[in-house]
Image (cartoon, grey):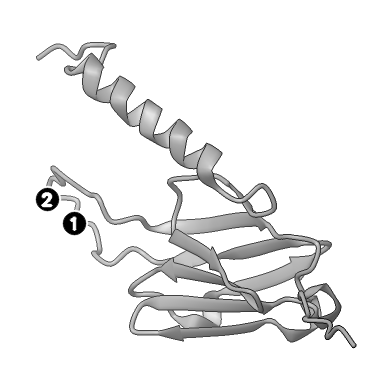
Amino acid sequence: MYRSLFPRDMYAELEQLQRDMQQALELSPAIRGFGRGGFPALNVGSTGDAIHVHGFAPGLDPATLDISLDRGILTVSGERPASVQRDAQAAVHINERFAGRFQRVLSLPEDADPEAVNARYENGILRITVPRRASAQPRRIPVQ
C-alpha cells in the first residue's frame, strides 16, 4: 500500500490551520503558550485576581511533575510512563496514548505573582493558580 505525501482532504487541513491561526490571535497578548498541541492539553484563563491553568493529564503520578515559574515563564514538565508493556509477539496497530517526557511552557503577564503559585493534581487534572500582584489590580478611588 502506498502513502501519499498529501492529506486526503486538503480543505479540512486548511480549515484546521485557519482555526488554529484564529485561536492564536484571539489569545490575550500577555498569555502565550509555546508548543500548542502538546501533552498535557492546557486550558488557560484569567480573572481579575489570578491566572488559571488547567492541564488534562490522566494517569500521571503527581510526584513526577515539575512546575516552575521563572521571570514570567511557567514551565510544566514531567514523564508519563507507557501503560502497556510491549510484547515482541504482538503487533500494535494504533497507539494514541502519549508516553514519555513532556514539557509545556507559558509566558505569563508581568503582574503574575511567582511567590503565591498554587498547584493541585486531582482526578487527572492539574490545576495551577497564579495570583496577580495586589498592586497591579485595579482599585476604585472614591471622589470626595
Q: CA distance from mark 2 to mark 1?
A: 5 Å
Residue 22 in percent (x, y) is at: 45, 35
**Coordinates of residue 92 in the picture (x, y in percent):** 16, 46
Give the amino acid type for the residue marked by disc 2 in the picture: Ala
Residue that appears at 22% across and 49% down? 95
Q: Quadrant of the C terminus?
A: bottom right
Callout 2 secondary element: loop
User: Disc number at residue 141?
Assistant: none
Q: Which residue is mark 1?
A: 87
Q: Are discs 2 and 1 less than 8 Å apart at CB? A: yes
Quarter assignment of residue 35: top right
SS for tag 1? loop
Q: Give coordinates of residue 19: x percent, y percent.
A: 37, 34
Q: Residue furthest front?
A: 144
Q: Is residue 122 above or below residue 112?
A: below
Relative to residue 45, is residue 116 depicted above or below? Answer: below
* Image coordinates for residue 71, horizontal then vertical, percent: 84, 62
Callout 1 environment at 10 Å: few (<14), some (14 to 19), or many (20+)?
Answer: few
Q: Which residue is mark 2?
A: 90
Q: Is residue 55 left or right of residue 103?
A: left
At 18% across and 18% down in the image, what residue appears?
9
Which residue is painted at 66% across and 62% down in the image? 75
**Would residue 65 appear left or right of 70 to someone viewing this image?**
left
Amino acid at circle 1: Asp
Q: Residues within 10 Å of mark 2 (few under 14, many from 20)?
A: few
Out of 28 and 16, give the one closest to the viewer: 28
